[in-house]
Image (tube, coloured by chain):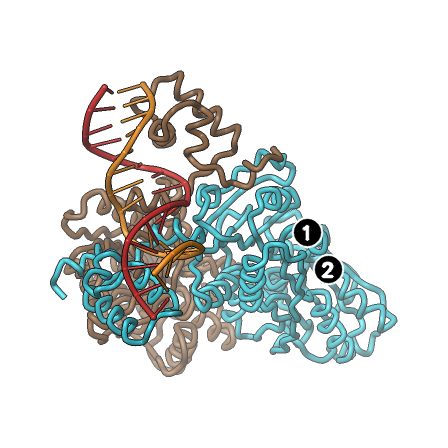
Chain colours: A brown, B cyan, C red, D orange
DNA sequence: CTGAAAGCGCTTACAG
DNA sequence: CTGAAAGCGCTTACAG
């Protein structure tokens, strides 16, 4: 084990010489060993093991013209949020299972930048470094057009896409049934007797808009009026939730349940309710969206939400992308993953007072 | 722009022909352009732009025998926690600035697995795919020995290392002054008049032990007795914090301030205090460790903590690793990054009652 | 400063 | 089933 072989500079030629075969045979053994006799195969494998042979990645990529590597591209986000970590884990699991590596990279571009002026990250620029792109974060049409023109295979995480995922050329997209999730959550609250259920979220953003639509379907089906509150003057979703809750408490809406556009909105709402001494779920029921890991750290009460299948979305993106690598002319596909209502401690019956008033 | 060149299959040879130069000259222009006349250089660059030339990564790696790629190895963790996301962001920023790409990979191994039996992830196994490793997560001595034997350059995030970071062979390590941080936090609480400050954390774990030591230094310097509480029968740090707080409240310790071993412990403690109706900081002051992003979602009160320079640690790991790539025989180095007390709303003066009793 | 050529370490038709 | 050889697209001494 102390021989020079351990330094890893053994080549296929040295293996061939030591095993008394040609380099082609060694290569065949390395790559699935079709058309190699069992005896030869065993002999070659023994030498490979003895000399601690490790193939050279660069040489392979050059000869094969494929890298067996995907790029996870986080677009237009300063850094990775918890939100995307689970998706990355799903991407990793599916990639590793298929023998692919994953390069992690950032990339910022404006939605109105001209297609030809978009400068991709260096690793994506190079030929043969990356086989396909997994686009996460906030993406726009101009980028997808650019990739289609460059004929770089890609798959898009729909959540942060500003366009219609069914109108994509040259690539696939994976999304989720967020509208259906919020619809179910709202229907559940209504079935508990809540009459005034309020939606809190910034409907200017596409994903909140889809959830707002689901909420409305449920409210209308119950013959009630949709109620929405949003104060976006703060910074992020958390601030917005906190300030919107202030308004709700100050106004005369009389809500007994809140459907938050996402989990951070819910956490902001909860913060205000706590500060104002409003008990959950005693005086107010609460449901969020995403089932983000952060909810783990709120146990009094535990928080209800809609599970977003982020891990599965990551895995599915890889599957679609690898299928496209096999056949570049596949038509664009859009897959929407199911969501699931997770009822925890923050949902309760209608408060006594409100029930009699209504 | 619609020509075949856009498909990206232009080689250096075609550039050479079109520019009436040799391939060597094109290569020189591509790589810093030393010893190339301005005129030639301009001509070659024009052709490169016109034909939309993109170098082939595999060919470069083969010829250069370097990949300009680092691997971020998350060891012995089922997935990435928020804890490590910031470190990854630091790694990314520093790598990109130096023209390096980052491959993200998982890897599990036991602390007692024999060195020779450790099977690294495929991408690390290959030669020429990865120039060096950035080890994050939970790591053990056997792994580092294995890497040293294979002569793979690496840098270790000390936080999850079970051994002494000053005893590493063949690689570097980056840690932080966690003891000093906890010492400062404890001293701050004592200076506010708190007499019974309690440490909550599992001192069986190396990082908690370092913080416990810092806490003790401050307590002893003030002539007081260290107090520690830990109930590890639950699952993670959060559960441990919650259960330990139950014990504290049930016991006769009379603490008025708690130094938590990390932020999750603090969140668990907070959850119990809330449930039991103990106000923060009115009846109990609280300080954590890490300044993890999760704290953002607790605003009533905002939570004090010790900032762990995770981003900077990530960046520093890259710096050390690249230095080592330049000179493989560099002696092992250990860098410890400073921490910083972040005082927010969860720290207050001693409660009236306690002050008089003590 | 520049060109012709060897060499990096694989894979893959092509013969046999 | 197997070997000899071409070829993948770069970089880098080596001459000039």
Q: Give the answer, above or below, for where A185 lies relative to A205.
A: above
Q: Position of residue B42 (x, y in %)?
A: 27, 74
Of labels 2 and 1, earlier in sequence is 1
Q: Give the answer, above or below, for where B211 lies relative to B351.
A: above
Residue at numbered disc 1: B168
In percent of the image, x 64 and y 70: which residue is there? B306
In percent of the image, x 63 and y 73: which residue is there? B280
Q: How many marks?
A: 2
Residue at numbered disc 2: B210
Q: Residue furthest right?
A: B223
Marks 2 and 1: same chain?
yes
What's the chain of the residue with tag 1?
B
Residue B181 quadrant: bottom right
Bin the neighbour count of mark 2 within 10 Å (Cα to Cα): few under 14, some 14-19, many 20 and up: some
Q: Position of residue B125 (x, y in %)?
A: 48, 41
Secondary structure state at the residue bearing disc 1: loop
Q: Is residue B260 left or right of residue C6?
A: right
Q: Is residue B356 left or right of residue A271?
A: right
Camera-nearest residue between B217 and B20: B20
Residue B287 quadrant: bottom right
Q: Residue furthest left?
A: B2
The quadrant the C terminus of chain B occupies is bottom right
What's the chain of the residue with tag 2?
B
Bin the neighbour count of mark 1 within 10 Å (Cα to Cα): few under 14, some 14-19, many 20 and up: many
Q: Is residue A81 left or right of residue B353?
A: left
Q: Position of residue D16 (x, y in %)?
A: 34, 60
């Amino acid at each position: 084990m102390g021989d020079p072989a351990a330094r890893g500079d053994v080549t296929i030629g040295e293996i061939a010489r030591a095993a008394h075969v040609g380099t082609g045979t060694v290569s065949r053994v390395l790559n699935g060993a079709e058309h190699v006799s069992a005896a030869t195969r065993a002999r070659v494998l023994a030498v490979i093991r003895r000399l601690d042979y490790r193939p050279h990645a660069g040489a392979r990529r050059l000869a094969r013209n494929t890298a067996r590597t995907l790029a996870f591209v986080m677009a237009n986000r300063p850094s990775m949020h918890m939100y995307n970590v689970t998706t990355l884990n799903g991407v990793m699991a599916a990639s590793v299972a298929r023998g692919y590596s994953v390069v992690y990279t950032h990339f910022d571009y404006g939605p109105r930048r001209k297609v030809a002026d978009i400068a991709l990250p260096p690793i994506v620029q190079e030929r043969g470094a990356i086989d396909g792109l997994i686009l996460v974060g906030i993406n726009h049409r101009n980028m997808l057009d650019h990739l289609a023109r460059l004929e770089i295979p890609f798959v898009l995480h729909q959540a942060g896409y500003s366009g219609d995922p069914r109108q994509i050329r040259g690539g696939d997209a994976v999304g989720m049934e967020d509208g259906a999730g919020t619809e179910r959550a709202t229907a559940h609250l209504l079935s508990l007797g809540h009459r005034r259920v309020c939606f809190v979220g910034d409907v200017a953003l596409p994903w909140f808009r889809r959830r707002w639509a689901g909420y409305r379907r449920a409210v209308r089906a119950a013959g009630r009026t949709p109620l929405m509150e949003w104060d976006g003057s703060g910074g992020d979703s958390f601030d917005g939730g906190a300030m919107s809750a202030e308004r709700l408490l100050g106004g005369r809406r009389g809500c007994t349940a809140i459907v938050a556009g996402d989990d951070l909105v819910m956490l902001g709402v909860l913060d205000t309710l706590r500060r104002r001494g409003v008990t959950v779920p005693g005086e107010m029921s609460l449901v969020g969206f995403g089932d983000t890991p952060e909810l783990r750290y709120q146990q009094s009460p535990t928080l209800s939400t809609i599970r977003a299948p982020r891990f599965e979305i990551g895995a599915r993106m890889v599957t679609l992308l690898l299928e496209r690598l096999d056949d570049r002319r596949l038509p664009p596909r859009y897959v929407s993953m199911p969501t699931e209502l997770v009822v925890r401690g923050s949902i309760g019956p209608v408060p006594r007072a409100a029930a009699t008033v209504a």
